[in-house]
């Protein structure tokens, strides 16, 4: 124990903890300084009850945005605590595309913060399910960001992770597609893993960012058809 304390002290001396954004010194096991943390754009009401899209106008009570009104989304609700802007977007991109795996901890905390939302706070869940990557993309990236975040959420909630889905078809990037094209691009891309069941389960689906909701919706559709009782989704950020 004493050796561990000495080693930790030496590590702090030669490799002091620093903010991942500005480089300012922070306490050990912290990743953002107070100033940078305060610059992370939170999603505040009013926002869409279905997909968390914020609205800048004055609306009292629950509403559904045009993104959700004009199409069927198969999840019950998708909840995000932050906008994918500025610091939030930068950290997620570093984590996802530049192998900054240590950033899974602050990003995982953002996912956990979403649990305080009224749509999730009083709900019980049986399983936490990460959105899967295709095997080729997993080999290319070396990790599935949604799986890492799901495991942080699982520990926080005390609910088991179940990798219930697999991505059976390699899809091209979604960024160039509109909403309808995204749904068509994803049709049939996911399936339930062999010998895995979600029947009668209350599922919490996890991903890093929600853009239009097409990926989450297709995953929710597959699990709904397999007998899931409900499928709510949570992400670190909302584009």
Image (tube, helix red, strand yellow):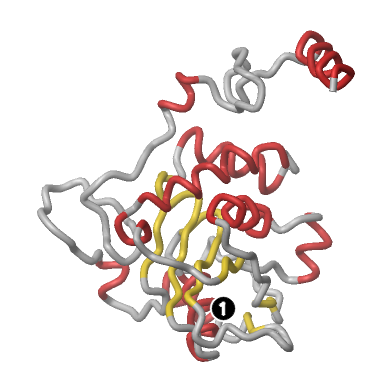
x, y (%) of residue 78?
A: 40, 63
- Give 9 or 215, whichever is nearer the viewer: 9
Q: Please provide percent x and percent y for residue 142.
A: 81, 55
Image coords of residue 180 (percent x, y): 42, 77
In the figure, is residue 171 to the left or right of 140? left
Give the x, y percent position of residue 27.
61, 18
User: Residue 101 falls in which quadrant of the image?
Assistant: top right
What secondary structure is marked by label 1? helix
Would residue 19 be found to the left or right of residue 170 on screen? left
Q: Nearer the viewer, residue 186 or 158?
A: 158
Q: Residues within 10 Å of mark 1 (few under 14, many from 20)?
A: many
Residue identifier under label 1: 186
Is residue 4 or residue 153 the one in the foreground? 4
Q: Residue at x 61, y 27 (%)?
A: 31
> Quick one: which residue is furthest to the front in this view?
1
As displayed, is residue 8 above or below residue 174? above
Residue found 45% across the figure and 59% down from its top:
211
36 vs 188, left or right, is: left
* Quadrant in the rendering for residue 196: bottom right
- Residue occupying the point 58% across, 19% down: 22
Q: Is residue 89 above or below residue 122?
A: above
- Residue furthest right as drawn: 3
């Amino acid at each position: 124990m004493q050796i561990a304390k000495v080693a930790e002290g030496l590590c702090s001396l030669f490799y002091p903890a620093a903010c991942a954004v500005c480089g300012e010194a922070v306490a050990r096991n912290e990743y953002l300084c107070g100033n940078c943390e305060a610059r992370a754009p939170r999603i505040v009401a009013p926002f869409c009850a279905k997909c968390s899209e914020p609205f800048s106008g004055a609306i009292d009570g629950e509403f559904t945005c045009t993104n959700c009104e004009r199409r069927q989304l198969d999840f019950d609700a998708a909840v995000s605590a932050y906008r994918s802007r500025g610091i939030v977007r930068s950290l997620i991109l570093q984590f996802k595309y530049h192998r900054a795996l240590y950033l899974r901890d602050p990003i995982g905390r953002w996912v956990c913060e979403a649990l305080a939302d009224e749509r999730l706070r009083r709900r019980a869940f049986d399983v936490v399910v990460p959105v899967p990557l295709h095997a080729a993309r997993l080999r290319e990236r070396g990790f599935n960001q949604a799986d890492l975040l799901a495991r942080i959420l699982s520990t926080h909630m005390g609910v088991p992770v179940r990798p219930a889905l697999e991505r059976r078809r390699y899809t091209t990037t979604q960024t160039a597609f509109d909403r309808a094209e995204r749904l068509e691009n994803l049709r049939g891309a996911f399936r339930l893993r062999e010998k895995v069941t979600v029947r009668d389960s209350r599922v919490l689906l996890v991903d890093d960012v929600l853009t239009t909701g097409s990926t989450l919706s297709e995953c929710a559709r597959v699990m709904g058809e397999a007998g899931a009782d409900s499928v709510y989704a949570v992400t670190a950020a909302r584009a």
